[in-house]
Image (tube, rainbow, N blue to C red):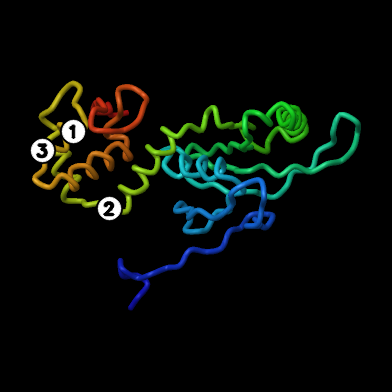
Amino acid sequence: MSNEEPNYYIPARPSEASRNVSLKSKVSNRGFLLNSTCLRWAGCESLLERDFLTILLAHPEAELFQEQPEPVTYVDAEGKTRTHTFDVLVFLKNGQRIAYDIKPEKLKVRSQIEATHRLIKKQHPNYAAKLVVRTDLEISRVHVRNAELILRSRTLWDEEAVEQLRQHLTSMHGVFRFAALVALFDCEADGFNAVLNLIDSQELKPVKRGPINDNTELEICKAA
């Protein structure tokens, strides 16, 4: 079988993190998540990191990401040379890079991570456009669940169903419930995934933030 055929199996490459992710820990759940942006395993040192990477994989503006990139050397407030490894370095489609650290909210202040970011930003202004801390307050279960739905729908892409929904939308205006769009299909599963596919491709968008479900109100995205 040629590797140019659509069903040819290509195994994911190992993680390219700058440090090994040990799966043994008494304080956090660790593991690996498939980074579909580059067909490579991504190491996660906590469930919070895994949730963040799940959201990232479904984000329309994120092109690539690298977990635990090469460490950055900086000088601290006492003049000592130190290194810091960001949890994730994200490459956006607009060419910008954003570096993230993922922390439980209760440890954010104690870790002094924001002070570390300020020093790195001052000493390495071109490292990334932004240095950001994300905590469990921003990484909500709703965002994770929505991302999981989007990622699953990508694996079930049906061009015929997507085109059928696009044709329906050409004569539709205003706001529609998710369930109403699914009802346009004879097969509920085909309709469900087609709606998610168009949300993913930014042809449809939820009117309000919240969990994606049958009652979610959607509108057609205006052409740029």
Query: Disc 2 marks which amino acid?
Result: Leu
Give the residue pinned by disc 2: 156
Q: Residue furthest bottom?
A: 1
Find the distance from the CA under tag 3 to the CA under tag 1: 9 Å
Tell me, for residue 75, which label it has, or none.
none
* The quarter of the displayed image where residue 220 is located: top left
Q: Earlier in the sequence, mark 1 or mark 2?
A: 2
Residue at x 55% of width, y 32% of height? 136
The correct choice, above or below, for 30 with respect to 202 in the image is below
Neighbourhood count class around disc 3 (C-alpha, 10 Å): few under 14, some 14–19, many 20 upward:
few
Tell me, for residue 184, which label it has, or none.
3
Query: Disc 3 marks which amino acid?
Result: Leu
Quadrant for the C terminus, please: top left
Q: What percent of the width, then of the height, locates residue 192?
A: 22, 42
Callout 2: helix, strand or loop? loop
Q: Nearer the viewer, residue 132 or 21?
A: 21
Query: Disc 1 marks which amino acid?
Result: Ala
The correct choice, above or below, for 147 with respect to 207 in the image is below
* The quarter of the displayed image where residue 131 is located: top right
Q: What percent of the width, then of the height, locates residue 35?
A: 49, 53
Residue at x 23% of width, y 32% of height? 214
Label 3 or label 1, whichever lies nearer to me, is 1
Find the distance from the CA under tag 2 to the CA under tag 3: 18 Å
Tell me, for residue 179, which label it has, or none.
1
Q: What percent of the width, then of the height, locates residue 52?
A: 52, 40
